[in-house]
Image: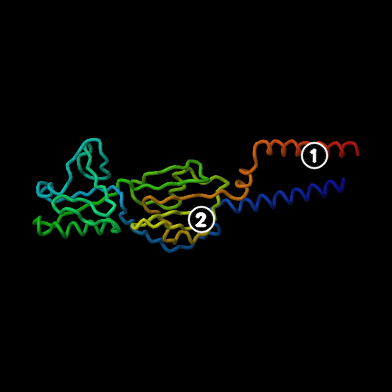
Amino acid sequence: MNQYYKFFIAALFIYLFTACTAYKKVPYLKNSTNENSTESKIVESKILPKDLLTIVVNTTIPEASSAFNLPLTPNSVIGNTSINSSVGLQSYLVDNDGTISFPILGKIKVVGKTKKEVELFIQSQLYPKYLTEEPIVHVRFINYKIAVLGEVSKPGSFVVNNERVSIFDALAMAGDMTLYGKRTNVLLLRENEKGEKETIRLNLQNKDILNSPYYYLQQNDVVYVEPNKHKANASSISSAETLSISITSTLISLTSLLITVFK
């Protein structure tokens, strides 16, 4: 009996040790404290080719700025504007050469610029040459979206209305990682205004992610959560192999039980 008791204690210890080790791989931001961390810098998204923009020019006299706004049309996306909600603004599609065709001003280069930079540029072109008062210009993205793939509950593409989303916001939209997701090596894919692809590896268990320049995502970012080695190994085993392993395990357990009973 003493021998079986020692065997039980050893098995219990191995189980608890394995469970604790597995648990350490699950939480985000391990070893975080109540200390204040430096606020992560929000990097302004730059306009890329094929982006869709709405641009609204406002003045105290609406008629004065109307020539610089595209016609209002029903059933189109308007974003957050104060214009009549029953209609929408036509959008500007950024061409491959990085330009848009703006009323009266003609083609203007917007690719590689932030929304604020485009707003200031249009203001400088309209006032005082065309307007007697400095206008208020609003630029918004229509197609601000991110994609989350891999070991998450609901992979997909998600539109972000407020144009601000962190890596954890993105995972929440996708229903969070599964237990098989590799939290220490999340892949971020990003494309710049020149069409160059950038790959970044993020460790979501390290609290330094909060201060990373990649903590906040940009439009068209793709987040890929890789499976851990247990999921990867399991995926390489066919259903027939799984059944064979299960039957073998059952026979071994039954044999051990019979030996114990008739010993």
* Residue shown at 20% from the left, 42% from the top: 83
Left or right placement of residue 257 versus residue 121 in this view: right
Which quarter of the figure has residue 238? top right
Amino acid type, label 2:
Leu
Q: In the rendered structure, find residue 224 and report the number of the disc placed on it.
A: none
Q: Nearer the viewer, mark 1 or mark 2?
A: 1
**Which residue is disc 1 drawn over?**
252
Amino acid type, label 1:
Ile
Compared to 110, does 142 lie above or below? above
Scheme of colours in the image: rainbow
Question: Which residue reaches farthest left?
Answer: 132
Give the class, few, some or many, for how many residues have Cα within 10 Å of label 1's Cα (few <14, many ≥20).
Answer: few
**Which residue is disc 2 drawn over?**
204
* Residue shown at 25% from the left, 38% from the top: 76
Q: CA distance from mark 1 to mark 2?
A: 41 Å
Name the secondary structure under disc 2.
loop
**Quadrant holding the C terminus:** top right
Nearer to us in this view, 181 or 241 = 241
Compared to 210, does 68 lie above or below? above
